[in-house]
């Protein structure tokens, strides 16, 4: 088994109330994980090797015999969606709450949503670049970069 990391070139992830939301900044599609999927995802993105995650799952009473297949399938889906990519080898222990695994019946779910796709793609936040900051390079809202700057300056002048 391997180590994986979040594909930060395309994805942004946030965990709230034990539920992960992962947004593909290129497509506007976002993914939701159930509680156990979120726990596994958090372990993975905290550099816990998948064999340590598997061992932790197997140590939980009532763990199904096909847990390795379920885990591999879940990880492969995240790889196929380009959420995860190969990471550097590391050795850490997994942190999995027994009750979370039991409540979700040892199932790790990934749900895909596109209902906010237009909104997410229209939001220029995905155009932020570390070296330059937010400087739109395309006419995504119908204005050139220069026209956008001019409009912003006019708006600022009106606010004064």
Image: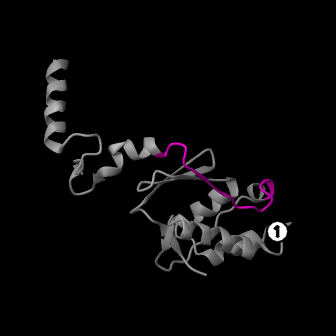
Out of 4 and 139, give the one closest to the viewer. Answer: 139
Image coordinates for residue 18, horizontal then vertical, percent: 63, 49
Give the position of the C terminus as an image quadrant: top left
Q: Is residue 89 above or below residue 18?
A: below
x and y, in percent, of residue 26 in the image: 41, 56
Decide if residue 108 is on the left or right side of residue 160.
right
In the image, the segment drawn in magenta is: 102-117
Magenta-colored stretch includes residue 112: yes
Q: Residue at image x 77%, y 62%?
A: 106
- In the visual, does 31 lie left or right of 145? right
Report crowding for label 1: few under 14, some 14 to 19, many 20 or more residues within 10 A (C-alpha).
some
Q: How is the image coloured?
A: one colour
Q: Residue at x 65, y 63 (%)?
A: 95
Quadrant (top left/top right/bottom left/bottom right) for the N terminus = bottom right
Magenta stretch: residue 140 in it?
no
Residue 98 percent across, percent down from the top left? 76, 59
Asked if 134 appears above or below 6 in the picture, the reply is above
Q: Residue at x 40, y 47 (%)?
A: 121
Which of these two is toward me, 78 or 15?
78
Residue 61, horizontal then vertical, whole percent: 84, 66
Residue depicted at 24% across the width and 50% down the height:
138
Among all residues in the image, which is located at the extreme right? Answer: 62
- In the picture of the structure, the residue carrying the numbered disc 1 is 63
Tell me if residue 8 comes above or below residue 25 in the rendering: below
């Amino acid at each position: 088994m391997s180590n994986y990391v979040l594909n930060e070139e395309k994805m942004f992830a946030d965990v709230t109330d034990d539920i992960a939301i992962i947004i593909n900044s290129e497509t506007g599609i976002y993914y939701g994980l159930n509680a156990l999927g979120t726990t596994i995802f958090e372990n993975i993105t905290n550099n816990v090797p998948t064999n340590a995650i598997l061992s932790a799952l197997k140590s939980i009473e009532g763990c199904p015999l096909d847990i390795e297949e379920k885990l591999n399938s879940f990880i492969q889906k995240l790889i196929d969606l380009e959420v995860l990519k190969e990471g550097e080898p590391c050795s850490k222990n997994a942190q999995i709450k027994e009750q979370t695994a039991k409540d979700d019946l040892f199932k790790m779910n990934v749900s895909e949503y596109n209902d906010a796709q237009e909104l997410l793609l229209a939001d220029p936040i995905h155009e932020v670049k570390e070296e330059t900051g937010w400087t739109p390079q395309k006419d995504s809202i119908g204005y050139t970069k220069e026209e956008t700057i001019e409009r912003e300056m006019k708006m600022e002048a009106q606010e004064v």
